[in-house]
Amino acid sequence: MKRSQPRLLAASIAALLVSIPAWQSLQAQEVPSTAETGASTAPQSDTATAAPDNTAAGTPVAETTASTAATGSAASASTQGTSLRRIWAWMQPISSQGVRADVLARALTASTTNDQGRQVAVPWSQAMPGGTPLTGTGHENRRLQQNQLEGNTLQYISHTDQDTRDISQGLEQSRTEVSWRLPSGELDNLKWSRPGTPLLSVGQSAFNILEVRTSGSTWFRRRHSASVQASSELVLKQGERIPFEQVIQDWNSGSGPQRIQLMLLKGERHDQFRVCFNINTILVHRLTCNVWQVPGSYWRNPQPLRYVGPYLDIASDNGENLYLRYPQ
């Protein structure tokens, strides 16, 4: 295993060197042209471009040339250092400002399993961060599953913590679905693609349904459902950084009150983030999130994220919010 690490690092550095020209090209597009800044484009006179004659002032021409060269070298080194810092910042998969588009794309196209009980959320004393678990409050634990259905549909299912195959108890569940597609192919094949390459498109339609299964029954019946629309698809592109604490897609019913919002929120640790659906329909008012952790080696080897667990903020009938999250 140790022998393979230098090879992995060398490969990641080589991939970085390949991506640098494309990144610099993208940065160059952000620099305003001379015409845009309103600066004069008139050619300089020959006198202005000629080497200055400093002999009258007692400074040898050779010393002046050497000083000019040293200044130019220092400026070049400073420019290179700034560029390297920008490239390094661009490579970071997560920062205090947000996450890279490819990181969010991996979170949205993943499925979760209940290994180590990570899909179980217990009542908590306050909204994230901080707080303590609440025991003996009478509030039930909840589960949250993230599935990828046929036809590239992301599905969130939230229900009380019980085996869905056990029909001896009644069950109510909230199901949210949105469509997505990979316009440029599989994410693993786009690890070092050019900036601006479309990675993931999240569709214009979203759907939420509140379903009820009575005791002894094997099927769910609809209690309430809502279909909402966004003005356009959400397209995540290589090189973009998606900011925290913002709505990144908004599906709504126009003039009606029903709305589903896709949000990116911070986690408790510097390497964690939450992907959330903020659901407000006639009968469902909750923030439903999955918490993801970015591996430390992601910057040189983009890879699947670590699933931490669910986080829920549910508005109760008495006007208070019920917070549930994965046990620490």
Image (spheres, helix red, strand yellow):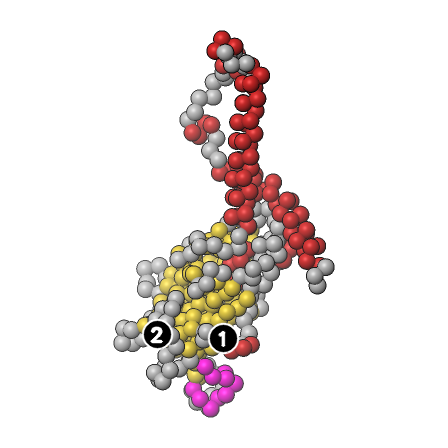
- Residue 23 appears at what percent x and percent y? 57, 43
Is 4 part of what is drawn in magenta? no
**Residue located at (64% from left, 44% from top):** 17
Measured as percent of width and height from the top left, residue 114 is found at 54, 76
Residue 125: mark in rendering: 2
**Given the current orientation, which residue lies at the most extreme top position?**
56
Q: What secondary structure prevails in the magenta region?
A: loop
* Tag shown at residue 142: none
The answer to whether residue 223 is above or below residue 86 is below
* Residue range corresponding to the magenta coloring: 161-170
Residue 166 on the magenta segment: yes
Q: Can residue 217 be seen in the rendering of this structure? A: yes
Question: Label 1 sits on what residue type?
Answer: Gln
Query: Which structural element holds mark 1?
Result: loop
| Residue tagged 1 | 119
1 relative to 183 in the view: left or right: right
Question: Mark 1: few, some, or many residues within 10 Å (few <14, many ≥20)?
Answer: many
